[in-house]
Image (cartoon, rainbow, N blue to C red):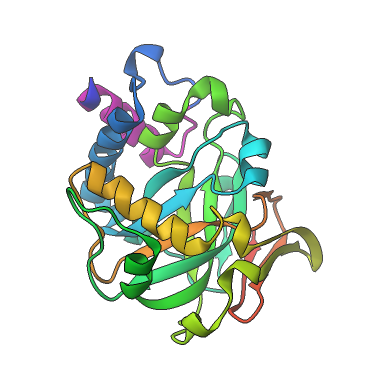
Amino acid sequence: METDASDWIAQRRLSGLSVADMPAELKPASEDDGYRVQAAVIERLSAAGWGPSVGFKVGITTPQMQAALGLHAPVGGTLLAHGRVAPGATIPYAAYTRLGIECEMAFVLQRPLGGPGITVDVLAAADAVASLHVAIELVDDRYGGAYSAFGIPAIVADNAFHSGFVLGDAVRDWKALDLAALRGVTRADGVVKHAGVGADVLGHPLNSLAWMANCRGRLGKRIDAGAVVLTGSLPVVYWASPGERIEIEIEQLGALALELS
């Protein structure tokens, strides 16, 4: 079943197609099953030239996002090298089913974090961090907007909305900042569309990093040194339109921009 599901999803992803019509018999029965299918999907995408895993993402981390999507718990996904986009790049809107822009904080690790049988708390998470970055996550609504009906396990299997990311400059003295209080905004053509603060992300962005490490540990894995971890969008997702100039900014961390063709 996992092999059939991962083959089906991988072929859809490689073809740039929606997965909204995923057959019910292929959908994983639980979140843990979904993560096992996700791992197999990542193997297939990597083998097809999408590159190695370079980190992880945590999504659906704010009350606002949970309310907007009708979902009620965080989900994790895997970042592939293929998905990294340079700051200021122009990306083709038509390459996505429904492109969303998320304004996030990302941590890069200086040492491994978590593992089987290890419970990671905020202090351990902070100690593993080398740098903090402002980041954009490119998400794609491949589910036709019917998130609850599609199901959390199947969303997890499809890599939890993830399609790419943009990483800003490293901030190494981040421990001097009150991350929970920092405000992030998403702009389109210079107009603020959404805003949020770090405290919206599971109470603090480091809680999100710890959540990801514990999720990996439950699956018998860890987060390796050098990994990028996207912690979730401060504002709700902005569903973009062709031709827009998108900018996200988090105070004291910086800004990033993209052009949509």
Location of the N terminus by quadrant is top left
Image coordinates of residue 82 in percent, x first then y, are: 36, 58
> Hey, which quadrant is residue 187 in on the image?
bottom right
Q: Is residue 66 left or right of residue 132?
A: right
Query: Residue furthest toward the right?
Result: 191
Image coordinates of residue 144 in percent, x first then y, are: 59, 28
- For image coordinates 50% across by 62% down, the residue present is 205
Image coordinates of residue 257 in percent, x first then y, are: 63, 71
Pick the front one: 241 or 43? 43
Q: Is residue 179 magenta?
A: no
Up-down relation of residue 70 to residue 259 (above or below): above
> Hey, which quadrant is residue 67 in on the image?
top right
Image coordinates of residue 84 in percent, x first then y, are: 42, 64
Query: Residue furthest toward the top?
Result: 25
Pick the front one: 39 or 63? 63
Q: Is residue 87 left or right of residue 261?
A: left
- For image coordinates 26% across by 63% down, the residue present is 113
Which secondary structure is most common in the magenta stretch? Answer: helix
Question: How many marks can you see?
Answer: 0
Q: Is residue 5 magenta?
A: yes
Up-down relation of residue 199 to residue 13 (above or below): below
**Residue range highlighted in magenta:** 3-19
- For image coordinates 62% across by 35% down, the residue present is 69
| Res. 95 visible in picture | no
Q: Is residue 140 left or right of residue 82?
A: right
Location of the C terminus by quadrant is bottom right
- For image coordinates 61% across by 39% down, the residue present is 66
> Hey, which quadrant is residue 197 in on the image?
bottom right
| Res. 150 visible in picture | yes
